[in-house]
Image: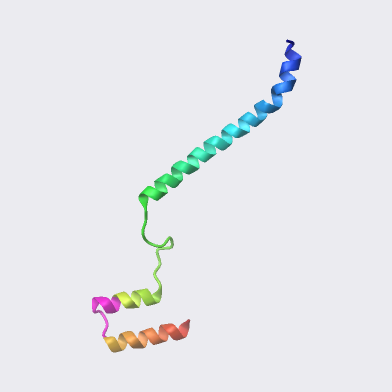
Amino acid sequence: MMWGEWGTEHWGWMLFGGIHMILVWALIILLIAALIKWLSGSKEPPTGRKDALEILNERYARGEIDRDTYQEMKRELQRAD
């Protein structure tokens, strides 16, 4: 077998092999990052912000505001939507 034949015939596979190796490592890194994110498991919404009505409900449940104030503020919030 001559060097010229083997070298030109398989050169394309070597290039694709390098690309495949990069893709495999990228996939491994993405899987590790996804696993870390899943294990950390944050239960809050991604933005960390709450809806105004949720905050109002929590304040009423804790007793910070009375029923009349709660109903008035709830009506105002619903009108704003």
Residue at 62 percent of width and 34 percent of height: 19
Residue at 72 percent of width and 17 percent of height: 6
State which quadrant residue 45 falls in: bottom left
Check the image and report above or below for 16 versus 43.
Answer: above
Of all residues shown, which one is farthest toward the left? 63
69 within the magenta span:
no
Quadrant where the image shows the N terminus: top right
Q: Which residues are magenta?
A: 59-66
Horizontal and vertical percent position of residue 27:
52, 40
The tally of labels here is: 0
State which quadrant residue 4 falls in: top right
Residue at 40 percent of width and 45 percent of height: 36
Horizontal and vertical percent position of residue 62:
24, 76
Left or right: 41 in relation to 9: left
62 within the magenta span:
yes
Left or right: 3 in relation to 20: right
Left or right: 55 in relation to 66: right
Q: Looking at the image, what colour scheme do you see?
A: rainbow
Of all residues shown, which one is farthest toward the front? 1
State which quadrant residue 9 falls in: top right
Residue in front for this viewpoint, 73 or 39: 39
Horizontal and vertical percent position of residue 35:
42, 45
Residue at 45 percent of width and 44 percent of height: 33
Horizontal and vertical percent position of residue 41:
37, 53
